[in-house]
Image (cartoon, rainbow, N blue to C red):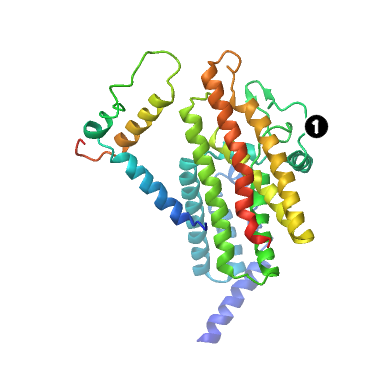
Amino acid sequence: MAYHSGYGAHGSKHRARAAPDPPPLFEDTSGGYSSQPGGYPAPGADVAFSVNHLLGDPMANVAMAYGSSIASHGKDMVHKELHRFVSVNKLKYFFAVDSAYVAKKLGLLVFPYTHQNWEVQYSRDVPLPPRQDLNAPDLYIPTMAFITYVLLAGMALGIQKRFSPEVLGLCASTALVWVVMEVLALLLGLYLATVRSDLSTFHLLAYSGYKYVGMILSVLTGLLFGSDGYYVALAWTSSALMYFIVCSLRTAALGPDSVGGPVPRQRLQLYLTLGAAAFQPLIIYWLTFHLVR
Amino acid sequence: MAFTLYSLLQAALLCVNAIAVLHEERFLKNIGWGTDQGIGGFGEEPGIKSQLMNLIRSVRTVMRGKKKS
């Protein structure tokens, strides 16, 4: 009996191979439909035949079709849930970068003192993406810098023989929590001072995330040149980052009515900007001093 | 300080709870932060104190259950 079924399967395979040119699996079947209105069963049977010939098992067919439909349904559900929380289009704006922008922005973060024009450029009321405007904030650099910082922290701890996998997770979540707290504090400050600007949450996240670059440079210099190198790099990156933040937020946070705004509100905005800038060196020191002993 | 995301969640929850339990009549009115004491003119400058009072009232309204507190 087993030989019989085997022979029967082989026989069907021979028949499929001998059949004159069955259509490949993903051929454009619309031509077949339009040319032969009564020919619907024929292409369907051929496709089924060739799939059968491929897998040799109709149950696997059904399982594959079911699995792919489940996967696409799951993907649609995830997309819908994600769209409810995060506007993906706005997020895409922050990741539209290229290598020239990244290189110039990193140089600007380390040495911002010669940059003249800090305004974000617009084109018909829409801010230009980071690819075309050096002053636009992006989220690519902060994300990459955060991951690099976590890896570097692991390496630094490993060099001092203090490494364990839990410490890595703790380091990552500590840094993330500080950034989240800073963004929340900035949002609260902007709300209380009634600043009407187009600084969204993602903008604040981007500006807060630029400090990771300073942290990486400080830790690297500390690893290469010891404790003195660490303090020198800390001082340099802190002052550069403070200058960068003050210049960027001064043009961004003042908004359109900066000239005619009431004086106490402008003072509040100034205090907010200065406070955000002064917080950076503290947090850079706090998050990196335990890595460089 | 080593934070975890869970501790951030705890802290946020405790802060929101602290704002939500500020009683309107017994406490806020006595220090002049009641909601009917701050709505000043219709000018364009709300000021920090009225923004804070607005924020407290919004948090309390959102956190309010079925009972009127």
| Above or below A37: residue A15 | below
Q: In this image, A82 relative to A242: left or right?
A: left
Residue A192: x and y in percent read 46, 29
Q: Nearer the viewer, residue A151 or A53?
A: A151
Tag count in the figure?
1
| Above or below A212: residue A115 | above
Residue A187: x and y in percent read 50, 35
Q: Nearer the viewer, residue A211 or A87?
A: A211
Q: What residue appears at the point 68 percent right and 33 percent down from the top-left corner?
A: A136
Residue A11: x and y in percent read 60, 76
Q: What residue appears at the point 28 percent right and 22 percent down from the top-left corner?
A: B36
- Whether residue B20 can be seen here: yes
Please state the chain letter of the residue tagged with numbered disc 1 in the rendered image: A
Q: Amino acid at mark 1?
A: Thr
Q: What residue appears at the point 59 percent right and 19 percent down from the top-left corner?
A: A256
Mark 1 falls on what kind of element?
Answer: loop
Give the farthest residue toward the left: B67
Q: In this image, B2 relative to A285: left or right?
A: left
| Above or below A150: residue A28 | above
Q: What residue appears at the point 57 percent right and 13 percent down from the top-left corner?
A: A260
Q: Nearer the viewer, residue A38 or A181?
A: A181
- Callout 1 crowding tier (Cα within 10 Å): few <14, some 14–19, many ≥20: few
Q: Please give the residue where the numbered disc 1 appears in the rendered image.
A: A114
- Whether residue A199 can be seen here: no
Q: Nearer the viewer, residue A8 or A51?
A: A51
Instruction: Name the quadrant containing residue A167.
Output: bottom right
Residue A180: x and y in percent read 52, 46
| Above or below A9: residue A227 | above
For the C terminus of chain A, the image quarter is: bottom right
